[in-house]
Image (cartoon, helix red, strand yellow):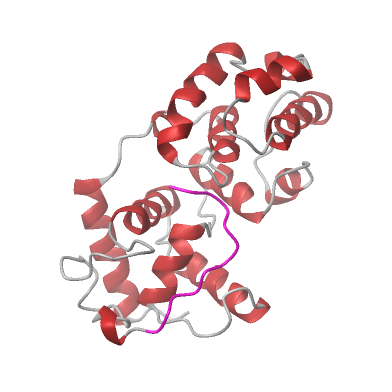
Amino acid sequence: MAASSPLRAFQRRLLAWYAVHQRKLPWRETRDPYKILVSEVMLQQTQVDRVMPKYHEFLRRYPNLEALAKARAAELRRVWYPLGYNVRPMRLRQIARRALRDHAGRIPDSYDGLLAMDGIGRYTAGAVLSFAFEQDAPILDTNVARLLSRYFKVRGAPKSGGTQRRLWRLAKDVIPKGKGYTINQAMMDFGAMVCTARAPRCEGCALRKSCRSFPWHNAVSCARPRRHRAH
């Protein structure tokens, strides 16, 4: 996408908003790829408030890949409870074992390396690359997809391949060079706090002057892609 006025306005206003309103979350206090991966897997279809206490407990019990790789299944499920989707801790253990076996005990820092791991898809790979390795990698979770769909007025069936491809292109195009970490976090927070699924706060929205769906009562329905993580 060529640099356009709406795109530049999106970047500038969103980053200014985030500088003031960013959420304080424990996984934002680290660049440890293991800890960030744990948080991303926990956040899949699970609310932030439920994840925070369990995130701390999990890392106390399994502080690194080595400890997780040795975990017994029954104990791992007990520590994970009550987050649900109990295949997730098993996949985390598989990732830990593979990292120790094939990657010298490190989480890979490339798309190919991450996507080769069981349970890591395009969103999780982008999140780890962006938040742990500070690469300009795009992400597309529920909040980001909703924000981009509304701001750029993306049309089409939410789950269609064409809509998904356009949203992923937008998620990449909106990243200013060298600021992938910051703008990705900003989009997630903005979608969770302002551009919400129900009753979005359009009147006080920092992006409303350049948003193609403002005012909201004239907006098309936003696309709702497959959920990756909840906030």
Q: Is residue 23 left or right of residue 34?
A: left
Front residue of 164 and 14: 164
Percent of width and height locating residue 186: 35, 53
Principal secondary structure, stretch drawn in magenta: loop
Q: Is residue 40 left or right of residue 107?
A: left
Residue located at (21% from left, 56% from top) = 16
The residue furthest left is 204
Q: Is residue 116 visible?
A: yes
| Residue drawn 40% across the image and 84% down it | 220
Say whether residue 65 is visible.
Answer: no
Q: How many marks?
A: 0
Q: Residue at x 29, y 66 (%)?
A: 199
The residue at 75%/32% (across/down) is: 95
Q: Is residue 136 left or right of residue 8?
A: right
Name, please, the residue furthest toward the right: 101
For residue 14, above or below residue 115: below
Q: Does residue 60 appear left or right of residue 112 in this picture?
A: left
The front one of 139 and 181 is 139
Give the image quarter of residue 195.
bottom left
x, y percentage for residue 192? 36, 53
> What stretch of residues is rendered in magenta?
220-231
Would you place residue 155 above or below residue 54 in this image? Answer: below
Q: Nearer the viewer, residue 106 or 167?
A: 167
Where residue 152 sits in the image (x, y, percent)? 39, 79
Judge whether 141 appears above or below 160 on screen. above
Q: Is residue 4 magenta?
A: no
Instruction: Give the image quarter of residue 162.
Output: bottom right
Question: Residue 32, image x and y in percent?
Answer: 53, 28
